Image: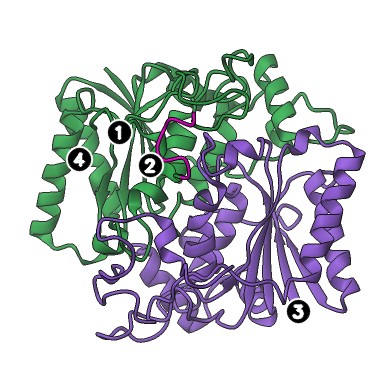
Chain colours: A green, B purple
Amino acid sequence: MKILLVYAHPEPKSLTSSLRDIAVAALEGEGHEVKVSDLYAAAWKSEVDRADFSNLAAKDRLQVADASCSAFAAGALTPDVEAEQDKLLWADALILQFPLWWYAMPAILKGWVDRVYANGFAYGVGEHSDRRWGERFGEGTMAGKRAMLILTAGGWESHYGPRGVNGPLDDLLFPIHHGVLFYPGYAVLPPFVAFRVDRLDASGFDRLAGRLRERMQSLFTDAPIPFRQQNGGDYLIPELTLCPEIGDADASGFALHIETSRTT
Amino acid sequence: MKILLVYAHPEPKSLTSSLRDIAVAALEGEGHEVKVSDLYAAAWKSEVDRADFSNLAAKDRLQVADASCSAFAAGALTPDVEAEQDKLLWADALILQFPLWWYAMPAILKGWVDRVYANGFAYGVGEHSDRRWGERFGEGTMAGKRAMLILTAGGWESHYGPRGVNGPLDDLLFPIHHGVLFYPGYAVLPPFVAFRVDRLDASGFDRLAGRLRERMQSLFTDAPIPFRQQNGGDYLIPELTLCPEIGDADASGFALHIETSRTT
């Protein structure tokens, strides 16, 4: 199988970098083919701006969704963005690897999402009708592919636990898991997370490396998080609210968007 | 009073830009002083890298938290970062204004957070003991100041509602509200949100502008979201998990970090 690993850390000698090398070696050891997009090494441009849309006339106002749609359709996106899109289409699985900074991606990786996820490619795909609201949240360009995160975090695991002060990690990652990965169709695997990385000793690193190798070996067999498909009957269209029979009438929160009848 | 508005949109003639002008005029109309950090206009650098830390020796490995701590203490951060820190210290209130892209900040604004929020300034502040885990989540450098978001979103309001397919907007924003604003001590106000901005007509814009003016007029009187203080007795230290008596024993989720006995 083919894997794209998008990697965002500024230090080539970091723990994150060591984990990347372990992940790549484990995947190649399984007979897979791996490409790495090292965003810092590539001096990736993080900001969406008019330079991204070569077919936008200088006199025209930049409306990002419209400009993205037009440039994608015309093949007028920039070569760096097109190269990443080609890699996404090539890969059977996508891994995003990054340190959690302020409970989210580093800017350079957010900029990869903002720029590579073009209108017509990652969103704005499929028909809108009274039965389907585009191909998204479980359908779309990436349907049939898998994705997962490899994270490093400075904090303690309990701080990110169900009742931890940071909020539960699963909820903190929902905007990425559901909003960035499930949105264009990926089946999303539970994340690999290394906590307290600034205090890791050699034996701790070995245990971590062992856990990561195992996860890479089961990349194509682990069960994904069973997010509900948008067009699968669980949501009213066009309101796109959960059908009344799902959960208690006044229940809300991210967990409702996971099918509890299926196990992860 | 003094307000810093940090603004992230690439198009000077955008709806977001019009809303910014309305917000600034409304604040100035109340007699306040306003500074705007227009990140695109300033060609803000989004990526944390070793160029941010002028006192880091070329032979040394970049460990971001350590390098940030050392550079902040030595006054060796870059002038663009120091200028933003000075504005944050100057302001009584911080407003972050941006279009919601992939359920999060545009990369350029995330890069403002990643770079301006230095170790010793926005985190790593205060003592760690068995009674206090640093000054954060309600304490810290920004204690006594207020903050809020002004957002534009392409989607429908129902899609971001309590049972909407995107997840509830309050939960999607928790990593920013709680993790970026409450963390260094800001009292966080409910956000101002404009939905379906691509389909707005003139009368819709007028209504939106009216709502925004009202929110700007009540910036210093609106009740903040009553997030729980980390060191106020609601969390065990050092686990930093909610005390057992808060919520049901198996309850989790972001809402537990808000004091339900207080009203917003």
Whether B7 is drawn above or below A8: the answer is below
Marks 2/4 same chain: yes
Q: Chain of mark 4?
A: A
- Give the quarter of the figure containing the N terminus of chain B: bottom right
User: What SS does tag 4 mark?
Assistant: helix
Q: CA distance from mark 1 to mark 3?
A: 49 Å
Q: Nearer the viewer, residue A203 or B100?
A: B100
Question: Viewer-nearest of labels 3 and 2?
Answer: 2
Residue A68 lies, with reference to residue B222, above or below; the image says above
Q: In the picture provided, is A139 more to the left or to the right than B193?
A: left
Quarter of the view holding residue A134:
top right
Q: Name the residue that disc number 4 marks.
A: A22
| Badges 1 and 4, same chain | yes
Q: Amino acid at mark 3?
A: Lys
Q: Which numbered mark, 1 or 4, is in the foreground of this view?
A: 1
Give the amino acid type for the residue marked by disc 1 in the picture. Thr
Chain-order first, disc 2 or disc 4:
4
Residue B2: image tag:
3
Q: Residues within 10 Å of mark 2 (few under 14, many from 20)?
A: some
- The answer to whether A190 is drawn above or below residue B72 in the figure is above
Query: Which residue is pictured at 85% across the width and 53% down the height?
Result: B209
Question: Label 2 belongs to which residue?
Answer: A255
